[in-house]
């Protein structure tokens, strides 16, 4: 079970969180000008890397905060936790 | 005599009686079932899985493959496949061998053994294809399986505990104790988990070892006392650490009451599951001794050498009277000498190493024990008990000599117990000096110590443990001198010998099975495991894995490191399912949500049903009334008088702030920005895929203040959805969102006489239609409580929804029941409530919608198309799929046969039902309409809006009826009643 | 290929089973093939088999990073069924089931197909109505299904928790009697042996690390850990790894990878004669021929390539299983593991040409890949041979993610699927 550090509450077990998937995805717009393939890319074509992934989590059973982290999808090692709006960390 | 008059750690003052396979035996407190059986001379304790060969106890711990029993058969405590080596004896214990009938000694299925030659590894893949497998399967299934699951449910409970520590030490052998002791001295929070009741591990079976100049047992006692006094140390006995998970979380099972008789366990939890999060972990899990592979090495009376030593020193049991010892390493000499000293005749030690033993050889020779260097076992006589052992010079074709013996002890070397290490993600390396895999690179904050790290001497164990526990290297406990060892000889099987050589006892697989697998190309170690089932049994191959992969290597010309090993899977030893689930049973598995009026409903005849997470009244039954009659009565009460409906679970999401209006205009597909203060509007919420995921009414309480009322089942999801958009996409907007769903009770008052009833509430505003029209709201107070009143209607009649803080819900409800008595007020359950809306053609999310429904399917296409600006899901409504004219649309359905239409019935056209038939649609809701006097239904139908008047067929479970397509609104099509 | 039969087993029994041939060769790669299939799981091996059997194409290699059948083929809960709602899915999975029904004889390998019934248990009226809809839709599609009463469910699953105190009361259910289980390893091994006998090279321990194109951008082969292998066409059948391979080939797939947990209890004598699934909790169970209860139903709710069990999911699945059949409470959990599943938004597969030339994909089966192995291979072989999708595979294109024509079975019912 993962141990995730909520920026508000500190290290808490995985079961208190929900994962919202890849983060830093920009919603395309304005809507009248979005081509179909761009919309499909937004809806479906996420990175799904084998390795480090920036994703967003919510501390559901805690303070309710949405925040970002960098997690390795193979080892589950979490190398960075940062708030919404913080700059996007580089990943190797 | 198997039991020695003195010695061991048993309590001779507490004799115990127990039964095995129908016979009564005696043992002592401190025995395991296995030691007690050996003490009673019971050699056959089970039958093998496939060939039904008699089998005896092989080991003394978790690695035991043979001695599996059904514990307490025929009682509610019955438990299959329990390792006798881990059952602590209690008075009255009853056990039965598994996989044998009527008993392990006389097993009628033993005849299967005669067919053994036709049942090599994987034989079932090659036959049973004609006529088909199902003809043979029942016989195979009956023959397979071990014990029986005969208790209809588990009468016992398990507890669950979370713990955090700086250091978790797994195993209280010398390495683990040294680690715990050093860490305790450092003041950290330490948890020490030991599978046995006693601490000490291998030291318990070694009376000669010394530490710091004193007998090792004294050092163990001293350490135990130190740990007991240390303030932050928790010692868990009878505790198996079964799994090593991510981020240094480990799961352990503590057996709280298994060692007690069932009668003594009542009122106590049987086990406790621990979830331990440790900063660091020390794995002092020891090592397992490997069997040697030679003909008939599975005969009862063939034991691991170290197991015999354990039975001697801990249980004062001599498991035979005359033993041959077979080995490829020095460790078996200790067993041979100790057993000799305890009175056993050691016929010979057959040592596969041409150069013989290291310094330990001298102690054997001193005792007059014959050491046959360069020799191995090539045959075993005796079927249900060893009678003789053939020892031959290794690699020589000539047969050797037969030695009389009733016990054969073997040691094929030691395999570090790397299971937890491997689960943690650590990488293993093959060490030729050990002839085994040992931990190489760690993946988590973990250190393997002592035998678990492949460092088998006591000195190494103590040094490793002390260092891993944070001790100063100069202060490590010192072991007494040990003889200089000679290297182990790799010896994986006995070539040229006649007879079956067993590799995996529990899976009943032989060296020939491994060779067959190799011949057939199953040369990956995973293929070997799956094809031969080696390592797939309940012991997960603790005694067999290394031998099997080494033999595979020999067959394919590879060394063990090239063959590789399989990944170990949790749990280390099997865990009782009840213990895994711990308290999560029944209502604690999935708690039901209750409204503030729950008790009132139950006291007034409500039939409570689950609707999503909520427990709600379905109908209120009057004496002698059927479910259907009750629903119709409640339905009519709303149409003709007044009904009360507990709508408390309806969502109540408050959204406020300067940006609230534009936020909701984006989230909700319908227009919200132009909604007037004090007014309400119905709207849909879509996913980004354009799919309707909820509907509800939005109220504007003030310029910057809104209240959303999502449907009961979706309230929590809607709140989370809104909050995700707020936090992640609009962090700079002025927005506050709160889920008040359970803070307020909600009561709907509906029916032509609803106003008569609410007039009895002096709320500080007018209840009349002129001042409080449909789709508006008022805020006031009643009885000292704030009151919100909404004029919305799901029922199609005049309807007021009253919301008060949850703690006032019951008094408001009771007031309305009292005040309404004169008007015939009737409590209404969910069933009637849903029928009321059905007559009106209102959708119910989840009935008329599914995860593919788009707004236009339910009639909202034009309204949304006219909305300016973007909203969630809008772009998806422009895709080809959304513009398809063939989509299913909401319709009404009237049965032409007078029957109520079955929900889930499928609509099709054509005179006959000849599948495959195109499905045109389906019935989504259906009920008798008391107002109309006949059944009505809603459905989704391809091009439904253009088909009104058409007659179609409906199919349900073989029944076919006819329906006419209509408008979905059956009642009060102009909506005059609800506005009244 | 030496035929397997009771007679050959009998003969070999008298000579120590020394006459059995290798089930498949371990060849070195040839310089080039007409088709290289990446991934020697069930789908990849079946593709190779049907390429020859249906289309006469034998110059084929199946390259595999690890050992054949070691991915999801060897990690699933072995259920086969075709109880699908939409005609597109029903046709696809029904074809798979029909191929399964003849597979042991077709491959001369006993895959132990046990059509013991796939039962879905409804715990509320709403679920029972969903069952009825499902069963009716199946009948319209021409597939067997029956709605069962509460008593019929109890008769099929004697230990089911139908008592008055049950957290999830039993209201009925529906069954596809032709559904059941098969031996997963045998499916991989059977296809491998049959494909090998037809001349297909199965190259294990050979990872594809890149795709080579000529100056004009035409695919000429794949780079592997065993060197370059020429190929006119390359098919990806790498469940759990599809995104990674797609990235190497230069495109993106609309899939996410999750860890699907599964587990078995220790073996016991027969106690469950059907495959049973609880609609309320999504847990499902069957008893293997060896006697273990095979239990599934839990997906970790975050993207993962870690093939290992995660305890919170295991707890939930086990608790759900005990709620359904309390008699398993005193059994012991013996082994847990996870497979990585590639999940599309609609949980339906993709069988299509990739957006880059020369590459073909079979992916996105989510948790349901095992039951589809024969048809996944059958339709991918057709696509490779004809360069146009098999009619059964047409709806399962990549284009549906732009058109929105998703085939979402789970969404259609609210039933976990």
Image (cartoon, grey):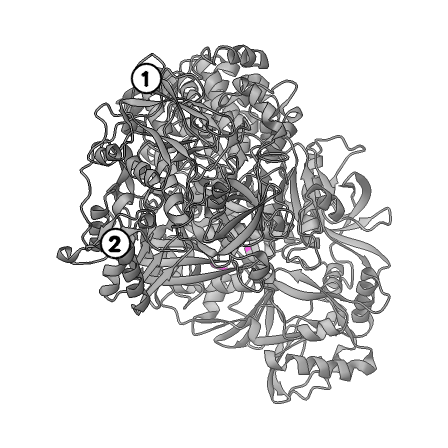
The image position of residue B959, as x and y in percent, is 81, 40
How dense is the environment of label 1, judged by Cα within 10 Å: few (below 14), some, or many (20 and up)?
Answer: many
The one of C336 and B962 positioned closer to us in this rendering: C336
The one of B293 and B169 positioned closer to us in this rendering: B293
- Residue extending farthest to the left is B474
Q: Secondary structure at mark 1?
A: loop
Q: Quadrant of residue B567?
A: top left
List the residue tagged with mark 2.
B215
* Mark nearer the viewer, 2 or 1: 2
- Residue positioned 37% across, 23% down in the render: B523
Q: Which residues are magenta?
A: B865-869
The one of B496 and C55 positioned closer to us in this rendering: B496
Q: Quadrant of residue C117?
A: top right
In the depicted structure, whether residue C362 falls above or below residue B952: above
- Tally of marks: 2
**Mark sitting on residue C29:** 1
The one of B931 and B738 positioned closer to us in this rendering: B738
Distance between mark 2 and mark 1 Cα atoms: 63 Å
């Amino acid at each position: 079970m993962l141990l995730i550090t909520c920026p508000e509450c500190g290290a808490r077990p995985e079961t208190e969180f929900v994962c919202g998937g890849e983060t830093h995805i920009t919603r395309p717009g304005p809507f009248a000008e979005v081509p179909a393939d761009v919309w499909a890319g937004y809806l479906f074509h996420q990175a799904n890397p084998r390795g480090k992934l920036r994703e967003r989590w919510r501390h559901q059973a805690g303070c309710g905060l949405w925040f970002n982290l960098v997690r390795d999808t193979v080892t589950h090692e979490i190398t960075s936790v940062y708030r919404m709006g913080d700059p996007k960390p580089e990943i190797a | 005599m198997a039991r020695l008059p003195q010695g061991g750690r048993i309590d001779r003052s507490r004799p115990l009686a127990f039964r095995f396979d129908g016979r009564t035996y005696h043992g002592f407190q401190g025995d395991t079932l296995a030691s007690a059986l050996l003490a009673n001379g019971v050699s056959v304790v089970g039958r093998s899985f496939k060939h039904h060969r008699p089998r005896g106890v092989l080991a003394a711990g978790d690695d035991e493959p043979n001695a599996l029993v059904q514990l307490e058969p025929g009682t509610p405590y019955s438990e299959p496949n329990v390792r006798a080596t881990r059952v602590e004896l209690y008075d009255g214990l009853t056990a039965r061998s598994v996989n044998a009938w009527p008993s392990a000694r006389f097993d009628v299925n033993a005849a299967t053994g005669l067919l053994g030659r036709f049942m090599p590894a994987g034989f079932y893949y090659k036959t049973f294809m004609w006529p088909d497998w199902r003809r043979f399967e029942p016989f195979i299934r009956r023959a397979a399986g071990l014990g029986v699951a005969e208790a209809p449910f588990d009468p016992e409970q398990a507890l669950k505990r979370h713990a955090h520590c700086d250091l978790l030490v797994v195993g209280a052998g010398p390495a683990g104790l040294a680690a715990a002791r050093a860490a305790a001295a450092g003041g950290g929070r330490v948890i020490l988990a030991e599978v046995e009741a006693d601490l000490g591990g291998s030291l318990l079976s070694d009376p000669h070892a010394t530490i710091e100049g004193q007998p090792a047992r004294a050092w163990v006692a001293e350490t135990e006392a130190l740990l007991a006094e240390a303030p932050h140390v928790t010692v868990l006995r009878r505790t198996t650490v079964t799994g090593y998970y991510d981020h240094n979380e480990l799961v352990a099972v503590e057996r709280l009451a298994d060692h007690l008789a069932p009668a003594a366990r009542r009122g106590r939890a049987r086990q406790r599951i621990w979830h331990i999060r440790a900063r660091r972990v020390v794995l002092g899990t020891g090592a397992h001794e490997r069997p040697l592979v030679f003909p008939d090495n599975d005969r009862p009376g063939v034991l691991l050498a170290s197991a015999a030593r354990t039975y001697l020193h801990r249980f004062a049991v001599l498991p035979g009277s005359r033993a041959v010892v077979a080995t490829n390493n020095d460790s078996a000499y200790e067993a041979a000498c100790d057993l000799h000293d305890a009175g056993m005749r050691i016929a010979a030690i057959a040592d596969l190493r041409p150069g013989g033993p290291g310094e330990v050889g001298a102690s054997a020779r001193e005792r007059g024990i014959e050491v046959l260097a360069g020799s191995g076992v090539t045959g075993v006589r005796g079927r249900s008990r060893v009678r003789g052992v053939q020892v031959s010079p290794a690699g020589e074709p000539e047969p050797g000599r037969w030695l009389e013996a009733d016990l054969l002890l073997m040691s094929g070397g030691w395999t570090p117990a790397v299971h937890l290490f491997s689960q943690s993600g650590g990488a293993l390396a093959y060490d030729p000096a050990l002839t085994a895999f040992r931990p190489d690179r760690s993946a988590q904050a973990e250190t393997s110590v002592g035998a678990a790290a492949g460092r088998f001497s006591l000195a190494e164990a103590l040094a490793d443990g002390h260092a891993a526990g944070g001790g100063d290297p100069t202060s490590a406990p010192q072991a007494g001198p040990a003889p200089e060892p000679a290297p182990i000889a790799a010896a994986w099987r006995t070539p040229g010998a006649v007879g079956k050589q067993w590799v995996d006892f529990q899976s009943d697989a032989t060296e020939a099975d491994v060779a067959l697998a190799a011949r057939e190309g199953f040369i990956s170690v995973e293929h070997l495991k799956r094809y031969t089932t080696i390592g797939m049994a309940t012991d997960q191959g603790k005694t067999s894995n290394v031998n099997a992969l080494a033999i595979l290597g020999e067959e394919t010309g590879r060394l063990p490191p090239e063959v590789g090993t399989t990944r170990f899977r949790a749990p280390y030893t099997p865990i009782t399912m009840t213990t895994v689930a711990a308290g999560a049973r029944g209502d604690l598995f999935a708690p039901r949500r209750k409204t503030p009026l729950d008790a009132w409903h139950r006291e007034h005849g409500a039939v409570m049903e689950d609707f999503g997470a909520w427990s709600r009244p379905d109908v209120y039954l009057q004496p002698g009334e059927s479910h259907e009659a009750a629903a119709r009565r409640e339905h009519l009460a709303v149409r003709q008088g007044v009904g009360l409906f507990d709508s408390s679970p309806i969502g109540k999401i408050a959204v406020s702030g300067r940006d609230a209006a534009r936020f909701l205009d984006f989230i909700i597909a319908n227009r919200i920005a132009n909604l007037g203060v004090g007014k309400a509007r119905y709207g849909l919420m879509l996913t980004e895929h354009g799919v309707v995921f909820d509907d509800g009414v939005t109220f504007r309480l003030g310029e910057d203040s809104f209240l959303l009322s999502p449907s009961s089942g979706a309230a929590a999801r809607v709140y989370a959805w809104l909050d995700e958009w707020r936090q992640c996409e609009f962090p700079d907007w002025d927005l506050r969102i709160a889920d008040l769903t359970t803070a307020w009770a909600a009561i709907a008052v509906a029916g032509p006489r609803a106003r008569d009833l609410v007039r009895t509430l002096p709320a500080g505003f007018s209840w009349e239609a002129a001042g409080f029209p449909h789709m508006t709201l008022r805020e006031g107070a009643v009885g000292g409580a704030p009151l919100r009143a909404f004029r919305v209607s799901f029922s199609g009649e005049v309807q007021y929804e009253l919301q008060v803080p949850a703690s006032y819900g019951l008094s408001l409800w009771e007031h309305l029941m009292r005040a309404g008595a004169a008007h015939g007020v009737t409590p209404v359950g969910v069933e009637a409530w849903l029928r009321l809306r059905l007559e009106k053609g209102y959708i119910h999310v989840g009935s008329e919608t599914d995860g593919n429904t788009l707004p236009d399917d339910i009639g909202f296409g034009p309204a949304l198309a006219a909305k300016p600006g973007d909203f969630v899901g809008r772009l998806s409504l422009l895709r080809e799929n959304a513009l398809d004219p063939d989509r299913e649309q909401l319709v009404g359905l009237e049965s032409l046969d007078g029957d109520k239409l079955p929900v889930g019935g499928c609509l099709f056209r054509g005179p006959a039902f000849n599948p495959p038939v195109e499905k045109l649609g389906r019935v989504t809701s259906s009920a008798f309409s008391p107002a109309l006097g006949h059944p009505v239904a809603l459905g989704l139908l391809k091009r439904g809006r253009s088909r009104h008047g058409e007659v179609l067929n409906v199919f349900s479970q073989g029944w076919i009826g006819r329906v006419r397509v209509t408008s979905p609104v059956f009642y009060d099509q102009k909506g005059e009643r609800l506005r009244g | 290929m030496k035929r397997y039969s009771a007679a050959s087993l009998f003969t070999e029994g008298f000579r120590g089973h020394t006459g059995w041939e290798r089930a498949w060769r371990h060849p070195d790669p040839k310089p080039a093939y007409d088709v290289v299939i990446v991934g020697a799981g069930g789908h990849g091996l079946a593709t190779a088999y049907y390429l020859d059997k249906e289309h006469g194409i034998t110059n084929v290699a199946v390259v595999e990073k690890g050992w054949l059948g070691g991915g999801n083929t060897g990690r699933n809960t072995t259920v086969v069924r075709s109880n699908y709602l939409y005609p597109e899915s029903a046709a696809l999975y029904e074809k798979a089931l029909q191929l399964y029904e003849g597979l042991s004889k077709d491959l001369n390998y006993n895959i132990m197909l046990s059509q013991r019934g796939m039962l879905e248990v409804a715990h509320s009226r709403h679920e029972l109505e969903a069952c009825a809809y499902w069963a009716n839709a199946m009948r319209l599609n021409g597939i067997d299904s029956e709605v069962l009463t509460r008593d019929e469910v109890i008769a099929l699953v004697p230990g089911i928790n139908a008592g008055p105190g049950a957290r999830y009361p039993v209201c009925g259910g529906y069954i596809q009697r032709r559904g059941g289980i098969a031996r997963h390893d045998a499916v991989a091994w059977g296809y491998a042996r049959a494909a090998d006998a037809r001349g297909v090279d199965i190259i294990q321990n050979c990872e594809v690390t890149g795709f080579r194109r000529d100056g004009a951008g035409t695919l000429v082969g794949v780079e592997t850990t065993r060197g370059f292998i020429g190929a006119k066409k390359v098919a990806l059948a790498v469940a759990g790894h599809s995104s990674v391979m797609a990235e190497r080939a230069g495109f993106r797939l609309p899939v996410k990878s999750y860890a699907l947990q599964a587990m078995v209890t220790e073996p016991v004598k027969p106690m469950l004669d059907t495959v049973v699934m609880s609609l309320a909790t999504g847990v499902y169970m069957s008893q293997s021929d060896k006697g273990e209860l095979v239990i599934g139903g839990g997906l970790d709710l975050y993207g993962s390539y870690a093939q290992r069990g995660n305890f919170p999911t295991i707890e939930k699945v086990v608790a759900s299983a005990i709620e359904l059949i309390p008699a398993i409470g005193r059994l012991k959990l013996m082994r847990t593991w996870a497979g990585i599943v590639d999940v599309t938004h609609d949980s339906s597969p993709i069988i299509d040409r990739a957006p880059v030339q020369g590459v073909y994909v079979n992916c996105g089966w989510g948790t349901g890949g095992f039951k589809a192995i024969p048809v996944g291979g059958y339709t991918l072989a057709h696509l490779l041979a004809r360069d146009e999708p098999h009619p059964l595979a047409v709806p399962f294109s990549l284009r549906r993610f732009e058109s929105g024509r998703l085939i979402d079975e789970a969404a259609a019912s609210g039933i976990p699927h």
